[in-house]
Amino acid sequence: MDSQGKFSPFPPPTALLLTPLAHFEPLTALRWLTVFSLLCLAGTIYLLARTLSWGIVDAAVFVLLSGFAIVNGFRLGQPYILASLLLVLGYRAYVRKKPISAGIWLGVFLPIKYYSATVLLYSRCIRIGKS
């Protein structure tokens, strides 16, 4: 590799995710974050299996195929695993015709990553098109 990486800023509210862990030693905080990420990963797999009527193994394989994204999420404490859980929760609520709940889950996801804005705009355009 020729470069050591690049700086790419996260949205400011992302820093608030780690505020509850600030009083711990760095290794202890990473351990707590790892446990939380494992729970989010398991929740994502379970909800994806339920939403798409897949088996747990099929959903696990689908989620775990992201490979380095999950490894980096655990190793570096990035919020992508939490973001995927919130995205699946929003999609599940949308599929089950619960637009307020879907908006809440995707709205919680919005300060973490701006990607959910595209999902919210898409669902809004679909509703306008049906009117």
Image: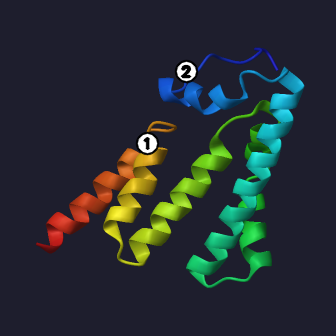
Residue 18, quarter of the rendered image: top right
* Quarter in which the N terminus is drawn: top right
The x, y position of residue 44, in whole percent, is 66, 63
Name the element at disc 2.
loop
Q: Residue at x 69, y 35 (%)?
A: 78
Bin the neighbour count of mark 2 within 10 Å (Cα to Cα): few under 14, some 14-19, many 20 and up. few
Identify the image's colour scheme: rainbow, by chain, secondary structure or one colour: rainbow
Establish if 26 lies above or below 34. Answer: above
Q: Residue at x 55, y 62 (%)?
A: 88
- Which residue is tagged 2? 9
* Comparing labels 1 and 2, the label whose residue is closer to the camera: 1
Nearer to me, 118 or 36 = 36
- Which residue is tagged 1? 110
Residue 93, quarter of the rendered image: bottom left
Establish if 84 lies above or below 21. Answer: below
Work out whether residue 65 can be spotted. no
Nearer to me, 108 or 83 = 108
The amino acid type of the residue labelled 1 equals Leu
The x, y position of residue 56, in whole percent, is 76, 78
Q: Is residue 5 left or right of residue 86?
A: right
The amino acid type of the residue labelled 2 equals Pro
Work out whether residue 105 can be spotted. yes
Q: Residue furthest left?
A: 131
The x, y position of residue 121, in whole percent, is 29, 52
